[in-house]
Image (cartoon, rainbow, N blue to C red):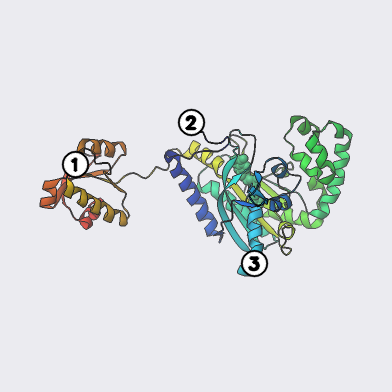
């Protein structure tokens, strides 16, 4: 038997309704913030991610699904959404839609990762990108939209960690200090870290190898190197969160795994398993890097696979798969036509109706209705067709009543 590729998942009918509920809830929150949906391709030219996400990141160096297409172009399945959205923003002249432009997306992403709990190779993100505001108020709005997701979904034990990684100006000084700290142990770092030492030492702090992590303890923190502008920006965010009574922690170890970030970075972590359920930050240089005008922006992406998991833990019985309202059991040629007609008309009125489509016996039809938890069963045979009346049974109470074989009447009875 052919199995699914490692790191991919089947979302089965017994789970998909939870995904729909969570996706709809997040969509509503984002739309209430004025964000409009954008859909971008699942694959882009590789160069977009090399330039956007950054040559020295794990994502670009180790995790991309890259291949040559039949015309020898290098193509990559999107490992994240921000670069593609920014490419689309520039290519379609979306700055004409007014500023700030607020977008959201719900898309699968592809990363060749070490597969483990909460870490897949195909995973789904809902994200938002707010393009065109340099004010800290945009960061606050985006952070609040993230918080609203966990509040609305009633997922507890989620903590907000924030940090600032400064701008290219202050980062230069920091990089020097960091290199000075790392230099004495340079030979002991892994090969990937060594390649990052000159180009982007900040990435060394993101290394997942235990020996590197150990040597990184005590490294200088970028917060001590922020320029006045970055400092004020960060202070304003902290002050606003405090005034709003929103709990947060400063975590100077957050450097994020993507190179485009400037100033604010943040993560919402599930304290139950330590996994990030949402990550984001400001990226004031990305639009220019990808070929557009200098345009500030901030955004986040949630990991839906992880959110569904924690949601399930706390809200198992909160939502249910839609139950069948009516099953129309039928026997005989004429009854079959009437059942088909009534089912068609009731569905058009928004009722969940099923009927036999396998030409089964009445017994087998009842069995199916029971298995699918039908609330009512209407039984139609030749006599019922002749008299234009049939029995409708409430499967929970067992009470049976007679009803005219008229869609309007049945609809009213069920509503
Ligand atoms: P990210 O931190 O790489 O950021 O991913 C965001 C979220 O996606 C993570 O917090 C996590 O919940 C989920 N995630 C990441 N990798 C996996 C995986 N292998 N399996 C399951 N879930 C995963 C970004 O992707 C940025 N584009 C976010 C952003 C938008 N920043 C600004 N705008």
Q: Residue at the location (74% across, 32% down)?
A: 209
Q: Residue at the location (28% across, 54% down)?
A: 344
On screen, residue 304 versus residue 258, left or right, reads left
| Mark nearer the N terminus (2 vs 3) | 2
Q: In the rendered image, is residue 245 in sight?
A: no
The picture places residue 66, in percent across and down from the top left corner, at 66, 45
Callout 2–callout 3 Cβ contact below 8 Å = no
Front tag of 1 and 2: 2
Give the number of the disc on residue 399.
1
Q: Is residue 408 above or below residue 255?
A: below
Q: In the rendered image, is residue 65 in sight?
A: yes
Q: Identify the residue position indicated by label 3 in the image.
A: 93
The picture places residue 163, in percent across and down from the top left corner, at 72, 47
SS at mark 1 in the image? loop
| Mark nearer the N terminus (3 vs 1) | 3
Q: Identify the residue position indicated by label 2 in the image.
A: 1
The picture places residue 75, in percent across and down from the top left corner, at 65, 50
């Amino acid at each position: 038997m052919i199995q699914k590729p490692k790191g991919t998942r089947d979302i089965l009918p017994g789970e998909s309704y939870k995904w729909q509920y969570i996706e709809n809830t997040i969509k509503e929150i984002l739309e209430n913030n004025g964000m409009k949906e954008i859909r971008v391709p699942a694959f882009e030219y590789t160069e977009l991610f090399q330039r956007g996400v950054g040559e020295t990141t794990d994502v670009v160096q180790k995790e991309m699904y890259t291949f040559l297409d039949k015309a020898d172009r290098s193509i990559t399945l999107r490992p994240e959404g921000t670069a593609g959205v920014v490419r689309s923003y520039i290519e379609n002249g979306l700055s004409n839609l007014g500023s700030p432009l607020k977008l959201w997306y719900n898309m699968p992403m592809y990363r060749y990762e070490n597969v483990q709990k909460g870490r897949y190779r195909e995973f789904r993100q809902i994200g938002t990108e707010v393009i065109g505001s340099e004010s800290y108020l945009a960061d606050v709005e985006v952070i609040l939209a993230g918080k609203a997701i966990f509040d609305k979904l009633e997922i507890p034990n989620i903590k907000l960690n924030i940090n600032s990684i400064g701008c290219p100006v202050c980062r230069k000084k920091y990089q020097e200090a960091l290199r000075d700290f790392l230099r004495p142990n340079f030979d002991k770092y892994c090969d990937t870290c060594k390649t990052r030492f000159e180009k982007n030492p900040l990435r060394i702090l993101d290394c997942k190898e235990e020996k590197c992590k150990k040597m990184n303890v005590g490294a200088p923190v970028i917060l001590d190197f922020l320029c006045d502008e970055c400092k004020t920006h960060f202070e304003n965010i902290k002050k606003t969160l405090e005034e709003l009574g929103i709990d947060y922690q400063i975590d100077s170890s957050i450097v994020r795994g993507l190179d485009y970030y400037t100033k604010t970075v943040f993560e919402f972590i599930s304290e139950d398993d330590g996994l990030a359920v949402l990550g984001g930050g400001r990226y004031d240089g990305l639009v220019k890097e990808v070929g557009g005008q200098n345009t500030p922006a901030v955004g986040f992406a949630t990991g839906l696979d992880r959110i569904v998991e924690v949601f399930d833990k706390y809200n198992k019985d909160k939502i249910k798969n839609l139950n069948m309202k009516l099953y129309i059991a039928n026997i005989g040629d004429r009854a079959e036509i009437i059942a088909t007609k009534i089912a068609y008309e009731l569905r058009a009125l928004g009722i969940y109706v099923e009927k036999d489509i396998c030409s089964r016996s009445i017994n087998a039809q009842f069995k199916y209705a029971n298995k699918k938890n039908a609330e009512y069963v209407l039984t139609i045979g030749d006599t019922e067709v002749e008299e234009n009346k049939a029995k409708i049974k409430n499967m929970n109470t067992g009470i049976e009543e007679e009803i005219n074989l008229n869609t309007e009447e049945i609809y009213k009875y069920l509503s």
